[in-house]
């Protein structure tokens, strides 16, 4: 299916947000996630479905000063 990840078109076979993160090799990363503008806590990622046309945002904390 076709989705948008961080503003870029992407294709995925993932059925859930957790599967998408695994596909992107981010399963163990500390990230914040949102689907269609709604924040998704880490505990809910396995139960959050991904559908064709969804917009997914994945944000990682950055160090700096």
Image (tube, grey):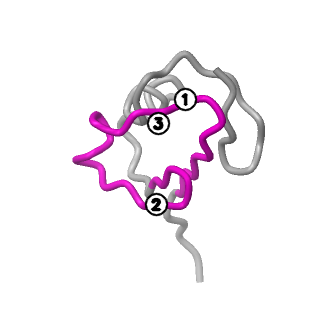
Check disc 1 and report the residue beneath it.
Answer: 24
The C terminus lies in which quarter of the figure? bottom right
Q: Residue 26 carries which label?
A: 3
Q: Is 19 part of what is drawn in magenta?
A: no
Q: Give the residue at x 32% y 41%.
A: 45
Front tag of 2 and 3? 2
Q: Give the residue at x 43% y 53%.
A: 31
Measured in 3D between alpha carbons, the distance from the residue under mark 2 to the one under mark 3, in whole angstroms, is: 19 Å
State the residue in front, 60 or 38.
38
Measured in 3D between alpha carbons, the distance from the residue under mark 3 to the one under mark 1, in whole angstroms, is: 5 Å
Q: Quadrant of residue 4?
A: top right
Q: Give the residue at x 48% y 21%.
A: 14
Labels 3 and 1 touching (C-beta < 8 A): yes
Look at the numbered disc 1 and give the secondary structure of its residue: loop
Look at the numbered disc 2 and give the secondary structure of its residue: strand
- Where does the image place residue 34, in percent across and percent down from the top left? 48, 55
Q: What stretch is highlighted in magenta?
A: 33-59
Q: Quadrant of residue 28?
A: top left
61 relative to 4 in the view: left or right = left
Q: Which mark is residue 9?
A: none
Q: Is 38 part of what is drawn in magenta?
A: yes
Q: Counting other residues with Cα less than 10 Å from the Cα at mark 2, is it few (<14), some (14-19), or many (20 or more)?
A: few
Q: Which of marks 1 and 2 is nearer the N terminus?
A: 1
9 relative to 64 in the view: left or right = right
User: Extreme right residue here?
Assistant: 8
Check disc 2 and report the residue beneath it.
Answer: 38
């Amino acid at each position: 299916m076709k989705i948008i990840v961080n503003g870029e078109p992407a294709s995925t076979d993932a059925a859930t947000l957790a599967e998408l993160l695994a596909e992107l090799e981010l399963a163990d990363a500390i990230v914040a996630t949102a689907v269609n503008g709604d924040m998704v806590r880490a505990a809910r990622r396995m139960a959050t479905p991904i559908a064709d046309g969804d917009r997914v945002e994945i944000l990682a904390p950055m160090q700096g000063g």
